[in-house]
Image (tube, rainbow, N blue to C red):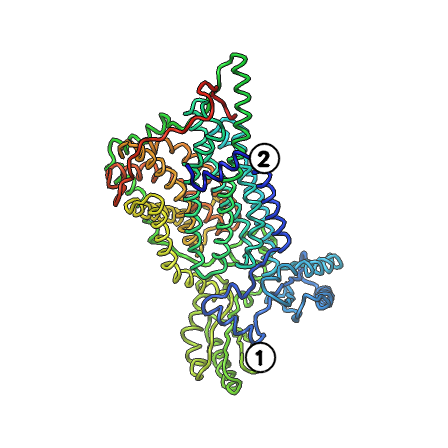
C-alpha cells in the first residue's frame, strides 16, 4: 500500500481540488506549447524507401526531381469544342498561372485524341508534400477563367488538389466519427454505472487526455515528423485506452465501496483502487507503450508517426487516471457521503453501489470453461484457427491514388483526365548518377533504353531526357498508358528494372541508377514493409513476453499471452481478408474492393493489438493472482477472477470496439481496414480469448500456471477503517 501509484492517489485524494486544477493547467500548457512550436510535417525526403527512394534522392541532388503538377481540362459544356473560345480561355489561363509565385512552369496545351478536350499542365515550385497548401491559388485562377468563359467547362485535378480533397474528406470523416463514438460511449458507460455523473467522468478524462496529447504531439513532431494521421491515431487510441483505464479504476473503487459497507472514507477507497487497478493501469499502459515503440524498428516515417501519437496519448491517459481521477472520485465520494448522512438523519435507507461481484450472465458464460475446460479450449482455438485460414490468400499492396473516394471532386476529374489522355496516366523516371566525364555515355545508354521502350507495347514511346548542370545526374521519363494500379503498369516497371536498365545503363562502369515514380513507390513500399516485419514482430513478441513476466513472475503466463495475442491477431487479419479482399461486403461497408489489404495494416494491427490485449490480460490475471495471494486455490481463483472482471472487460471492449467501428465509416480504404480489423480483434480477444480460452488453459494447467514460482500465499490484509463502522453506505451517483 505504499507503491508509487498509491502515493500519487493518496496525494490527489488529500488535495483533490489542487490535483484537478493541476490537471487542467497541464492540459492547457500542453496545448499552449503545441500551438507555440507548431506541427513539423514530414517532408518528401522522409518518405523515401527502396530503389524508388534512392532514385528520387539522386534526382533531387541534380535538381531534376519531378514537380507536383495540376492539370486543367477545358471542354465544351455541350456539343463540340469551339477552338477559338477554347484557345482564348487557355491563353488567359496560362497568363494567369504564370504570374503566380507558386508556379514553376505552364506547359503548352495538349488536345485529346478525340479533339473534345484541351489540357493545360501547371508545374508547382517547392516540396511535393507542400503542394496541396498552394493549390488554392491555382484553383482560384481556374475559377476566374471559368467565370469569364461560361460557355466552356474548366475542371482542375492533380496530386495537390487530390491530396487537399483527401484531407478535407478526412476532416469530415473524423467529425462524423466523433458524432458516432461519443454518444455511444456515453450510453455504454451509463449502462455500466447507472449514473450520468459517473459515466461522464471517463469520457471527460479521455477527451482531456486527447487534448493534451495533441499539444504534446506537436512538440514531439520536431523529433519524429508528423505525416498527417497523428490526430486520427490520437483520437482513436486515446478514447479507447483513456476510457478503459478510467473504467478499470472506477469499477474497482465502486466494488471496494460496496464491500466496505460505508466503513471506509473516500480517500481510503481511492487508495485501495490505486493499489490494485492502479497498478494494472500502469503495467498495461507501459505494455502498450513498449509494444507500440517497436514500430520505430520499421524505419518508416508513417509508422514512426503512428508510434509517436500512440505513445504520447497512452502516457497522458495513464497520468490522468493516476492523478485527476483519484481527485474526482474523492470529490464525488465526499459529496455522496454528505448526501448519505442526510438520508440517514431522515431515517431513509442507504443506497448501495453496483459492485462488480460477477452476475449470473458471466457465470453462465464461464460454465463451459469450468465444466469442460479441454473441450472448450479445443473448440475455441479451432474456431479462431478457422478464421486464420483466409490468410493464405493475403495480398498486400500500397493503396494508390486510384483507391481514393470518387466523392472528392478532383478524383472525378482525374478519372476524366485518364480517359481522355491515357498517355499521361503513369510516368516512370529513370535516374542515373555517374562521373561528369561519362555524361555522353550515359546519354547514349538512356536513348538506347528509350528506343527499346518505344518498341514495347507497355510504353507510349514518348520520353523526356534531362541532365543536371554539373552533368553528373541524368533522368529519362517514360510514359505508360495504363492506370497506376494495373498489372500492365507493374509489368512495365519490371521490364525497366530487370531487362532494359541492366542491358543499357548497367554496362557503364560505376554508374548508379534506379527507377522512381508512383508505380515504383507502390512496389517498393510493401517490399520494404515485408522486409521489416520479422524484426518488428520478433521484438513485439519479446516485449510482450517480458512485460507479462514482469507483471506476474510467470514464464507460463508469458508464453500463453504471446500465443493468445498471435492467435487473436491472426484470426482478425483472416477475417479482414475475407471481408475486404472480396466484393460481398462492399455494399454494407461502403467500399470498393481493391482485391488487397493495405501494406501498413497487418503490422499496425499486431503492434496495437498486442498492446491493447495487455489491458485485458493484466486486469483479468491480476484479479486471479490477487485471489491466489490471499490463499484461494488456483482453480477457484481463476473462476472468481474472470467472473469478477468479465463485466468491466467486456464493457471496456464495447467502448473500444465502438471507437474502432466508427473508423469503418471513413472513406479512406486503409483507415476502414484498420478500424474493422482492430474492432474484430478486440471483440475476439474480449469475448473468446478472455472468457473461454484463457480460463480453460489456466484451469487445465492449475498451479503450473505460475511456473516457475507460485505467488506466495498470505493472509488478506483488511484495510484499516478510517471511518466509524456505523458510517452509512454511500452512493457516488
- Residue topped by disc 1: 468
Whether residue 58 is visible, yes or no, is: yes
Q: Position of residue 172 (x, y in %)?
A: 59, 46
- Residue at the image position 35 percent from the left and 25 percent from the top: 360
Pointer 1 or 2: first along the chain: 2
Residue 17 is tagged as: 2
Q: Position of residue 556 (x, y in %)?
A: 28, 45
Q: Residues within 10 Å of mark 2 (few under 14, many from 20)?
A: some
Q: Position of residue 644 (x, y in %)?
A: 37, 31
Q: Residues within 10 Å of mark 1 (few under 14, many from 20)?
A: some
- Residue at the image position 46 percent from the left and 71 percent from the top: 457
Helix, strand or loop at mark 1: loop
402 left or right, relative to 702: right
Q: Nearer the viewer, residue 76 or 351?
A: 351
Q: Nearer the viewer, mark 1 or mark 2?
A: 2
**Number of numbered discs visible in the structure rendering:** 2
- Is disc 1 in contact with disc 2, using a CB cutoff of under 8 Å? no
Q: Position of residue 36 (x, y in %)?
A: 64, 54
> Where's the N terminus, which quadrant?
top left
Residue 161 is tagged as: none
Question: In the rendered image of this protein, does residue 435 appear above or below residue 418?
Answer: below
Question: In the rendered image of this protein, does residue 320 appear above or below residue 109?
Answer: above
Helix, strand or loop at mark 2: helix
696 left or right, relative to 194: left
562 left or right, relative to 286: left
Question: In the rendered image of this protein, does residue 221 appear above or below residue 201?
Answer: below
- Disc 1 to disc 2, how far (Cα)? 66 Å
Whether residue 638 is visible, yes or no, is: no
Farthest right residue in view: 148
Amino acid at each position: 500500500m505504499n507503491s508509487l501509484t498509491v502515493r500519487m492517489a493518496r496525494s490527489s485524494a488529500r488535495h483533490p481540488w489542487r490535483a484537478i486544477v493541476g490537471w487542467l493547467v497541464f492540459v492547457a500548457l500542453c496545448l499552449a506549447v503545441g500551438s507555440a512550436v507548431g506541427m513539423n510535417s514530414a517532408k518528401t525526403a522522409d518518405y523515401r524507401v527502396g530503389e524508388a527512394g534512392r532514385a528520387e534522392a539522386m534526382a533531387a541532388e541534380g535538381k531534376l526531381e519531378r514537380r507536383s503538377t495540376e492539370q486543367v481540362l477545358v471542354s465544351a459544356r455541350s456539343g463540340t469544342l469551339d477552338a477559338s473560345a477554347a484557345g482564348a480561355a487557355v491563353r488567359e489561363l496560362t497568363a494567369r498561372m504564370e504570374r503566380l509565385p507558386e508556379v514553376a512552369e505552364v506547359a503548352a496545351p495538349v488536345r485529346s485524341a478525340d479533339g473534345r478536350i484541351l489540357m493545360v499542365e501547371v508545374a508547382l515550385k517547392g516540396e511535393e508534400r507542400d503542394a496541396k497548401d498552394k493549390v488554392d491559388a491555382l484553383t482560384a485562377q481556374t475559377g476566374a477563367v471559368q467565370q469569364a468563359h461560361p460557355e466552356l467547362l474548366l475542371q482542375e485535378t492533380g496530386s495537390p488538389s487530390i491530396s487537399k480533397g483527401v484531407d478535407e474528406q478526412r476532416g469530415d470523416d473524423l467529425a462524423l466519427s466523433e458524432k458516432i463514438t461519443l454518444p455511444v460511449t456515453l450510453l455504454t458507460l451509463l449502462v455500466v454505472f447507472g449514473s450520468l455523473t459517473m459515466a461522464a467522468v471517463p469520457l471527460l478524462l479521455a477527451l482531456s487526455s486527447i487534448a493534451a496529447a495533441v499539444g504534446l504531439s506537436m512538440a514531439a513532431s520536431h523529433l519524429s515528423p508528423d505525416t498527417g494521421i497523428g490526430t486520427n491515431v490520437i483520437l482513436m487510441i486515446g478514447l479507447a485506452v483513456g476510457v478503459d483505464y478510467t473504467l478499470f479504476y472506477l469499477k474497482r473503487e465502486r466494488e471496494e465501496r460496496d464491500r466496505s459497507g460505508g466503513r471506509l472514507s473516500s480517500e481510503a477507497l481511492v487508495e485501495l483502487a490505486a493499489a490494485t487497478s492502479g497498478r494494472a493501469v500502469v503495467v498495461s499502459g507501459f505494455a502498450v507503450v513498449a509494444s507500440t515503440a517497436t514500430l520505430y524498428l520499421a524505419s518508416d516515417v508513417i509508422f514512426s508517426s503512428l508510434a509517436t501519437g500512440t505513445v504520447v496519448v497512452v502516457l497522458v491517459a495513464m497520468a490522468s487516471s493516476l492523478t485527476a481521477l483519484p481527485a474526482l472520485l474523492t470529490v464525488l465520494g465526499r459529496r455522496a457521503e454528505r448526501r448519505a448522512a442526510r438520508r440517514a438523519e431522515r431515517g431513509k435507507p442507504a443506497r448501495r453501489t453496483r459492485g462488480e461481484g460477477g452476475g449470473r450472465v458471466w457465470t453462465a458464460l464461464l460454465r463451459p470453461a469450468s465444466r469442460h475446460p479441454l473441450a472448450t479450449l479445443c473448440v475455441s482455438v479451432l474456431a479462431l484457427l478457422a478464421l486464420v485460414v483466409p490468410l493464405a490468400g493475403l495480398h498486400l499492396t500500397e493503396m494508390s491514388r486510384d483507391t481514393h473516394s470518387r466523392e472528392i471532386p478532383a478524383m472525378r476529374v482525374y478519372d476524366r483526365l485518364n480517359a481522355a489522355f491515357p498517355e499521361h496516366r503513369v510516368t516512370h523516371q529513370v535516374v542515373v548518377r555517374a562521373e561528369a566525364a561519362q555524361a555522353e555515355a550515359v546519354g547514349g545508354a538512356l536513348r538506347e533504353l528509350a528506343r527499346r521502350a518505344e518498341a514495347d507495347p507497355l510504353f507510349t514511346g514518348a520520353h523526356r531526357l534531362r541532365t543536371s548542370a554539373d552533368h553528373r545526374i541524368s533522368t529519362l521519363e517514360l510514359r505508360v498508358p495504363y492506370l497506376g494500379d494495373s498489372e500492365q503498369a507493374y509489368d512495365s516497371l519490371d521490364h525497366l528494372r530487370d531487362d532494359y536498365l541492366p542491358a543499357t545503363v548497367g554496362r557503364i562502369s560505376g554508374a548508379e541508377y534506379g527507377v522512381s515514380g508512383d508505380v515504383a513507390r507502390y512496389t517498393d513500399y510493401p517490399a520494404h514493409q515485408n522486409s521489416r516485419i520479422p524484426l518488428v514482430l520478433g521484438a513485439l513478441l519479446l516485449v510482450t513476453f517480458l512485460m507479462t513476466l514482469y507483471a506476474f513472475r510467470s514464464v507460463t503466463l508469458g508464453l500463453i499471452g504471446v500465443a493468445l495475442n498471435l492467435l487473436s491477431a491472426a484470426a482478425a487479419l483472416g477475417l479482414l481478408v475475407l471481408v475486404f479482399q472480396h466484393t460481398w461486403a462492399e455494399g454494407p461497408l461502403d467500399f470498393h474492393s481493391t482485391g488487397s489489404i493495405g501494406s501498413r495494416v497487418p503490422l499496425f494491427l499486431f503492434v496495437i493489438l498486442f498492446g491493447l490485449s495487455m489491458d485485458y490480460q493484466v486486469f483479468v490475471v491480476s484479479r486471479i493472482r490477487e485471489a491466489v495471494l490471499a490463499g484461494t486455490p488456483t482453480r477457484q481463483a481463476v473462476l472468481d477472477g474472470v467472473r469478477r472482471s468479465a463485466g468491466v472487460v467486456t464493457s471496456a471492449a464495447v467502448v473500444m470496439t465502438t471507437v474502432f467501428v466508427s473508423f469503418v465509416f471513413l472513406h479512406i480504404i486503409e483507415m476502414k481496414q484498420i478500424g474493422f480489423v482492430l474492432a474484430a480483434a478486440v471483440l475476439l480477444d474480449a469475448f473468446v480469448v478472455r472468457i473461454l480460452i484463457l480460463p480453460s488453459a489456466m484451469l487445465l494447467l492449475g498451479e503450473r500456471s505460475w511456473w516457475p514460482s507460485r505467488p506466495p500465499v498470505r493472509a488478506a490484509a483488511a484495510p484499516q477503517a478510517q471511518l466509524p463502522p456505523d458510517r452509512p453506505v454511500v452512493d457516488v451517483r
